[in-house]
Image: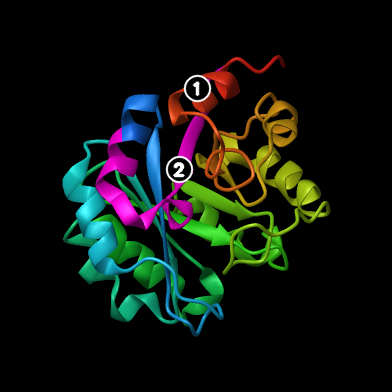
Amino acid sequence: MKFDLMASMMCANYGNLEKEVRDLEAGGIDSFHIDIMDGRYVPNFAMSLNDMAYIASSTKKPLDVHLMVEHPNHTVELFTKHLREGDTIYIHPEAEYHPSTTLQKIINAGITPGIAINPGTSVETVIEMLRIVKKVLVMTVNPGNAGQMYMPYVGKKITKLLALKEDMNFQIYWDGACGADKIIEYAPKGVDGFVLGTTLLFGKEKPYGETLAGIRKLKF
């Protein structure tokens, strides 16, 4: 069964970021998930533009850049200039007056457009944007901090999105509190990828390659 595994780099060891990138790449990670927070849209700061640029320069793997910032239309071009074809930028529709304008900037830069949907955001409020984007990042926890609890009602939202994805031509990605049980349940249903953080990947007493190989061998 094919599904992507993305490393949530806000959970990485910043004492040696170069080694973290190298070990994750060697271990078989599919892409690097970069959380950018401005302290306004979410009450926290995470990775910076410079962190993202460094990782982009250190790997040929794709980057998934998650902008948890107010009015990304004002700054999105600062990020696109460091990215390549095959990389993705997600924005939160609530963070922008006219999110389709920001998505068009991402498209014009040759970057894959995506939206991130918070637990409290309904599918119905973003339905038209699903015709524009190629990826939908479903937040199964409130954005802003690692290590939060999964919100079970988000599963019904994923079911709605799965019913739309083929007709509207987008992929679905899971972000937040991702354990093996969630992959076992939702990968067969059609979720295309999972962001891995402290629940399953980081802070464990074994190499990344061993953890990732174990995930890919899960029994469905």
Label 1 belongs to which residue?
210
Left or right of 196? Residue 24 is left
From mark 1 to mark 2, how far is it between C-alphas?
14 Å
| Kind of residue indicated by mark 1 | Glu
Q: Looking at the image, can residue 110 be seen?
A: no
Q: Secondary structure at mark 2?
A: strand
Give above or below for 97 relative to 211.
below
Give above or below for 113 relative to 69.
above
Q: Looking at the image, can residue 58 be seen?
A: yes
Tally of numbered discs = 2
Q: Is residue 15 magenta?
A: yes
Q: Looking at the image, which residue is at 66% across and 18% down? A: 218
Q: Looking at the image, which residue is at 61% across and 38% down? A: 200
Left or right of 139? Residue 58 is left
Residue 181, by quadrant, is top right
Residue 158 position, x and y percent, is 71, 45
Q: Looking at the image, which residue is at 22% across and 43% down? A: 85
Give above or below for 161 relative to 180.
below
Write the start and end of the magenta stretch as one range: 1-22
Q: Are marks 1 and 2 in contact (CB under 8 Å)?
A: no
Give 104 or 49, whichever is nearer the viewer.
Answer: 49
Give 64 or 170, whichever is nearer the viewer.
Answer: 64
Residue 99 position, x and y percent, is 45, 72
Q: Secondary structure at mark 1?
A: helix
Left or right of 34? Residue 174 is right
Label 2 belongs to which residue?
7
Tell which tag, 1 or 2, sits nearer the viewer: 1
Residue 179 position, x and y percent, is 69, 38
